[in-house]
Image (cartoon, coloured by chain):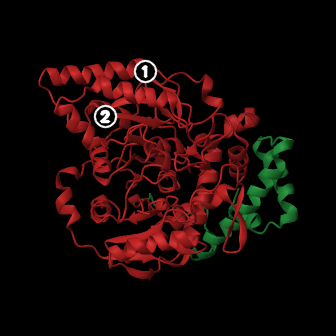
């Protein structure tokens, strides 16, 4: 295991203390031996070829930039040329291999990062637990008896467990933020469309986002910058980029007006989740009990859109081979496919209503805080949990605080609250649309103040 | 399907969810395996409850023919 940061690896490489090949070899060995069931594939030969190309570039005096030689892996819904894009399913195991890399994969490779493998996930990204019926559950590095969260559970566990300093995931309803929070690492969901989704297997096209996981805010910024850029393959892609990593010190010093979302966003939250949120709120001198009206309805609308659009996307396979789906996913997709079409239409119609409510709130605030999830990571296999005195489904409840935010496409950094020796708890740093810089400003300031930090799991502390 | 179908879906009682499942499954040509029926019905009931939450706050009756804004965050 290695808890080197991207920045640390870059220094070691430029000072000649290691090579891209050595870094890749260590990462490949860790990926093959990892105990969390985070990986579903390891791309050994290709990784070594990429690493050798980076070393050759350095030898020729060409510095590819801060991600040169950095090992990374991707949720297995990203296309990787020459490999089948599983999207966590059994159904796609016989699909043709991807002919080209997803845009995000291609951009990281072009920046010199070295692709090590593909990562476990909930089937078709429809879940918050990564208890995949075909590939098994991904285990939380902080407590292997507990879930890593999902649907990008492998992506979070690989970073949390010291396998890699950088991974990619996707977030439709919380699938980056929840595993980041439960595994105690940084995860970023950008503004809807900011990072190209081209070459990723869709779940709900109008809600899908992609983003990085890392162990520091600065590393997250490096990855975010490399992933940005217009892309004609994704119609939501903006024409301009907003690189941040060259101005992190200025961002960390920026003043921020911060509010803590109350009401729906704390309903049923476990005491340790509220306690962690308060630590962050105190550090940012945030105003408490800020109300974002309509959040419960927004969460419901995201639920319905996901079921309906997901059901439509999978209609033919559901009709032909429903029993080949993960049961936990299949029943929801079938129900979604049976909905009247007007349900999704009404859910889409509510979207600008709720967006406008959030815009009004951001007239008074630069940043909003909310917990990532109502609880720390539940045990693997636990179907229900008690929330505000009611037994609820773990799978359907973990996203209660994330779904309203992704429904309107706001950028969020899920940040791990610094609670040494305690189960990881994450906080959402929520910024206005297209203002990722404000979420990074808060993350950097909190990290430098020691309020948020990605800890090594207990067995790797030393 | 029409706006009336949306109302009918929202007004389903728990006892009538299974019948809705059978009717809709036949209409769409989407067979629901016997082993999945209980889970699908449970999810339909949950989606009915969720639908009531956001339809309840939308102003006025839902017009299925009204254009939906191309969403911008």
Residue A382 locus on image (x, y percent): 70, 54
Q: Residues within 10 Å of mark 2 (few under 14, many from 20)?
A: many
Instruction: Write down the chain letter for disc 1.
Output: A
**Who is closer to the viewer here, A20 or A295?**
A20
Chain ID, mark 2: A
How far, Cα to Cα, is label 1 from label 2? 15 Å
On the rendered structure, is A234 left or right of A292? left
**Label 1 sits on residue:** A44
Q: Mark 2: which secondary structure?
A: loop
The image quarter in which residue A383 lies? bottom right
Q: Which residue is mark 2?
A: A70
Residue A219 position, x and y percent, is: 30, 47
Residue A117 appears anywhere in the view: no
Report crowding for label 1: few under 14, some 14 to 19, many 20 or more residues within 10 A (C-alpha): some
Does residue A383 appear in the picture of this structure? yes
Q: Is residue A150 left or right of residue A259?
A: right
- Picture layout, residue A70 above or below residue A330: above
Drawing shade for chain B: green
Residue A313, position as x, y percentages in the image: 61, 42
Residue located farthest toward the front when viewing the structure as drawn: A462
Q: Are marks 1 and 2 in contact (CB under 8 Å)?
A: no
Chain letter, red: A
């Amino acid at each position: 295991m290695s808890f080197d940061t991207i920045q640390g690896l870059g220094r070691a490489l430029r000072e000649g203390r290691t090579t891209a090949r050595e870094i890749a070899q260590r990462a490949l060995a860790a990926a093959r031996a990892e105990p969390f069931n985070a990986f579903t594939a390891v791309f050994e030969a290709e990784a070594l070829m990429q690493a050798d190309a980076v070393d050759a570039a350095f030898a020729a005096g060409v510095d590819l930039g801060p991600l040169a030689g950095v090992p990374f892996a991707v949720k297995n819904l990203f296309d990787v040329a020459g490999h089948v894009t599983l999207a966590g399913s059994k159904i796609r195991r016989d699909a043709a291999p991807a002919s080209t890399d997803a845009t995000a994969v291609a951009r990281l490779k072009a920046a010199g990062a070295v692709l090590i493998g593909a990562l476990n996930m909930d089937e078709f990204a429809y879940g918050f637990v990564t208890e995949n019926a075909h590939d098994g559950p991904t285990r939380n590095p902080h407590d292997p008896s507990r879930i890593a969260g999902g649907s990008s559970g492998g992506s979070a566990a690989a970073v949390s467990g010291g396998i890699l300093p950088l991974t990619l995931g996707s977030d439709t309803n919380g699938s980056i933020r929840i595993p980041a929070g439960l595994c105690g690492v940084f995860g970023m969901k950008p503004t809807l469309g900011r990072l190209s989704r081209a070459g990723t297997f869709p779940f709900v096209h109008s809600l899908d986002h992609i983003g990085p996981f890392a162990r520091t805010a600065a590393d997250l910024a490096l990855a975010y910058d490399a992933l940005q850029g217009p892309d004609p393959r994704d119609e939501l892609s903006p024409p301009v980029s907003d690189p941040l990593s060259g101005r992190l010190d200025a961002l960390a010093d920026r003043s921020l007006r911060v509010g803590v979302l109350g009401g729906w966003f704390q309903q049923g939250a476990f005491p340790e989740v509220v306690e962690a949120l308060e630590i962050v709120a105190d550090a940012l001198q945030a105003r408490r009990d800020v109300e974002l009206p309509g959040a419960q309805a927004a969460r419901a609308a995201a639920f319905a859109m996901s079921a309906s659009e997901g059901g439509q996307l999978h209609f033919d396979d559901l009709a032909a081979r429903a029993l080949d789906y993960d049961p936990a996913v299949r029943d929801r997709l079938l129900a979604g496919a049976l909905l009247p079409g007007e349900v999704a239409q009404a859910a889409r119609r509510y979207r600008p209503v709720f967006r406008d409510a959030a815009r009004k709130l951001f007239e008074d605030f630069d940043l909003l805080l909310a917990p990532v999830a109502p609880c720390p990571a539940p045990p693997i296999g636990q179907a229900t949990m008690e929330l505000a005195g009611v037994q609820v489904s773990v799978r359907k409840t973990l996203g209660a605080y994330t779904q309203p935010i992704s429904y309107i496409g706001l950028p969020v950094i899920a940040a791990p609250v610094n609670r040494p020796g305690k189960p990881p708890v994450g906080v959402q740093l929520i910024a206005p649309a297209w203002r990722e810089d404000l979420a990074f400003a808060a993350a950097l300031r909190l990290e430098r103040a020691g309020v948020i930090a990605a800890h090594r799991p207990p067995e790797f502390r030393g | 399907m029409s706006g009336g179908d949306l109302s009918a879906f929202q007004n389903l009682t728990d006892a009538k969810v299974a019948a809705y499942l059978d009717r809709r499954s036949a209409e769409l040509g989407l067979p629901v395996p016997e082993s999945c029926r209980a889970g699908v019905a449970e999810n339909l009931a949950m989606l009915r409850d969720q639908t009531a939450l956001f339809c309840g706050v939308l102003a006025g009756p839902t017009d299925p023919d009204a254009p939906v804004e191309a969403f911008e965050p």
